[in-house]
Amino acid sequence: MPRLLLEVGVEEIPDWMIEPALESLGANLAPLIEKLGGGQAWTDATPRRLVYRSRYTLDKERDEDTLVQGPSLSAGEKAAAGFARKMGVPVTELSPMDTGKGLYFSIKQRKMGLPARELLATALPTAIAGIQFPKTMHWGGKDSVRFIRPIRWVLALLDDEIIPFDIAGVPSGDWTYGHRVLGSKGPIQITIGEYDQMLRDNYVVVRASDRESKIRAGLGAGVRPDPELLKTLVYLTEFPTAIRGSFDPQYLELPEEILATVMRHHQRYFTVEKPDGSLAPEFVAVTNTNGDQDGLIRKGNERVLRARFNDARFFWRVDQQKKLSARVDDLAKVTFQAKLGSYKEKAERVQQLAVQMAAQVGADENTVSIATLLAKCDLTTEMVKEFTELQGLVGGLYAREQGEGEAVATAIYDHYKPVSMEDSIPRTLEGQVVALADKIDTLRECFRVGLIPTGSKDPFALRRAAQGVVKILAEARLPIDLFAFAERNEELLQFLQERVAHYLREVKGFPYDEVNAVTATKSGVLMDVLDRLTAVHDVRPTPNFEPLAASFKRIENILKQAEAGEAGTVRQELLAPGPEQDLYEAFLRIRSDMAKGGSYAAKLTSIASLRPQVDLFFDKILVNDPDAAIRRNRLALLASLLTEFSTIADFSAIVAQGGNAQS
Amino acid sequence: MDFYQETVFKLKRYWADRGCILQEPHDLEVGAGTMAPETFLRVLGDKPYKVAYVQPSRRPADGRYGENPNRLYKHQQLQVILKPAPADVIEQYLGSLEAIGIELAKHDIKLEEDNWESPTLGAWGVGWQVMLDGLEITQFTYFQQCGGIDLDVVPAEITYGLERIVAFLQDVDSVYDIEWAPGFKYSDVRLADEQQFSAYNFEMADVQRLWRLFDEHEAECLELLARFRKAPDQSRFPVLAAYDQVLKCSHLFNLLDARGAISVTERVGVIARVRKLATAVAAAWVRQQSQAAEKEVA
């Protein structure tokens, strides 16, 4: 089988863009491999190279036969001769072809497939240039290729022959380059079978999984797992080697959150813990080297960390000189959003909203009031100016230090939570209220001035804010109507409804039709929505449920077709004895059962028990009775069923699949 | 061990050997080497240019009264512009580290994504921060736009943070302990500067007067730009003087910011005012250059 090796040599690609770039390259080349009879393909990458390898079946593209259509048979021999001449074939080779619109002269033409090397030489530059990156640059004039960083070499081999092409002024070749510092200085000529080993000899581990194993093997004891950091380091290095360093235990007096942030986010170090789980005064750095024989790298990293910790300690001390409570006015100078004024204004709005909400859910109003006012004050601290990702958390730590009390401190500490769908919600009721009020204010204000997310653009992270609100309301089971916050803003209402549906489907995993059935009631009290949804989900597999749902759908259609409008009330005297009368009685019985209370599941089961009567009704009774009064009465009966029994869920939204509906 | 000034000599020598003009710093307050006309104006247009210079860079809000070992109101940048960026620009850069005594094989060098953007200058580029054993020592940028003008000839900008690099080379924890020259530490040369300007920038600079100065320099710049448009011979028109007014405005903006005098609503507006000047000057400069080029051809 022919072998293809492509390596695009690029100046250091941002680590987080590498995997998507490989996916894009793979997708661009897949049709090509298909043309060559199909085969296997692999992608690999380091920061300096995107690699694509394939073993495919044919050494040339398949020939393709096509029928070229000529004049209609009815056009006669003269036309046929003309067509044959044009195509360069004797008339005898023409054959009739049925186009569906009559018979035509036609000729079979064979398009000869290109040899693989030629095909690749044309297709590879396009596939490379077509790699999708979130941000690109140009380096050789405006009209040249845009790429993530300059392309410096291209290794392109078909077995051991160069596939000749040119991209961004770089000719393809049979050479690559090794590690910037440790590899041999010039180009390295590659034979395809030894590519991995030749790179390895030049301190490049080309497979991400091998680099990951190499890092893991070097981590040592007590290292806290950090998959995200691990992945970053895999794509920041070509020859990763972990080294361990330490820091003065006196810095452990600073909160662990701050130390860990400095190490993980700013220095990209793994943190290490003691056997008791607390932070150890050590770290593991992953270098792009072959070790640290003289200990210089360890020493250098330790010094940088010391400076960072010194800064943090300095910030901590300076910040304590002005309490959070004395910083509220300073928030007037911090922009929330250009169109929306300052954080001081925001804090005041959030405070008002949170206090109202606290009354609703029984949270301590005083705690909520203080916490909302102080929550954003850490934006004016040196610590947060330096470590912006610690906002909120720093406020909480400072509030505790400054004697604001544990309840206030915790509420501030948690108020950005949940930062993702995996993250937990604030731990306390007061924290939940503060977090909700903050996010709802952001949503409301942004929508008010038209800062609305579109497609992939969501610069103010409004989806995340809304998702957080939904998660808190649902998981904390707060009796608050989310949709009431949209007030009269239709766009916001719709946005929130979408986020609720998204949460129920994607996070909670309910089938889409059950979600549709339950959200059709337009209730914004999410704890209740969830209860109803759970009940629908539980009752759905019972035998009566889906058939009844189908009947409800039918009822809905009948009412729609009848354009019944206000169907009015059922007049008992017009009911025919038998199935119609029976249905009505069953309806009354179930309605009164439901009025007595009970769980949603019990109520749904009770509604579902209506099935035999409904079935019999449709079997035996003609809704469209010639007598208009009777017809109207029957429609009224059906309408009553629909409205009375759709308060938990809209049955007609259920898609009957024998209980197998998937989202 | 090299003194601070030796390291500076070596870097300058290194880049002079690679064809750079060695310039002296611009003699006005700037926030970064990028703002000096040797970068801001020279990267515009198609003319190749290579230059290196040390640029003392003032960032009033970063002052720490000389009390923080790593933070300075004014730090020294060694700025290198290679236009167009040569294909081996990173190799050349790594060579400069070797030239100042960093044995690369014994250290960990990483290029980590760090894109640069200056809203006041209407400029942006993509690039990296260069990390040496976990320490950011250089900002490397491929300019894409400057003064609101897309750059057809893309320059590489290499900005060395001199204090950091030398503290690393001299193995000291505080920049103030750097040995600048025999018998003189960084603190002997610059500590008073840090202390006094921190006090001035944070406490004493007169806000009303700063605003007036801002308005005056802006007015001067706008007037020059207006006259440029009408000038019968634009080739000798003082566009460079107009650019100095932009730098004045930019520095005054930074001072006002350090004084906490710019409100939320004002901030975006003030940045836009400076950008408007910067982009207009850039356009004027390009026009002037292309006219000069036409004359040469003629």
Image (cartoon, rainbow, N blue to C red):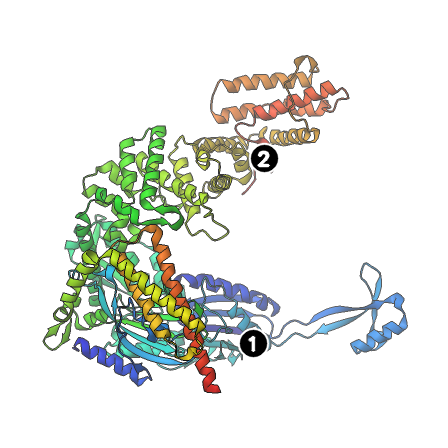
Residue situated in front as seen by the camera: B24 or B294? B294
Image position, residue A60 (x, y; %) = 62, 74
Which residue is under mark 2?
A653
Q: Amino acid at mark 1?
A: Ala
Image position, residue A584 (x, y; %) = 63, 18
Position of the N terminus of chain B, as image quadrant, is bottom left
The quarter of the picture where residue B184 lies is bottom left
Above or below — where is B147 with respect to A190? above
Q: Which mark is residue A414?
A: none
Query: Which residue corresponds to the image point at 51% horizontal and 70% vertical from the top-left?
Result: A128
Residue situated in front as seen by the camera: A314 or B260? B260
* Residues at discs 2 and 1 both on one chain: yes
Q: Is residue A584 left or right of residue A378?
A: right
Q: Amino acid at mark 2?
A: Ala
Callout 2 crowding tier (Cα within 10 Å): few <14, some 14–19, many ≥20: some
Gap between marks 2 and 1, in whole Å?
54 Å
Which residue is under mark 1?
A121
Image mark 2: chain: A
Callout 1 crowding tier (Cα within 10 Å): few <14, some 14–19, many ≥20: some
Residue situated in front as seen by the camera: A32 or A595? A595
**Can residue A221 be seen at all in this image of the molecule?**
no
Q: Tag count in the figure?
A: 2
Image mark 1: chain: A
Image position, residue A270 (x, y; %) = 28, 58
Query: Which residue corresponds to the image point at 89% horizontal and 66% vertical from the top-left?
Result: A74
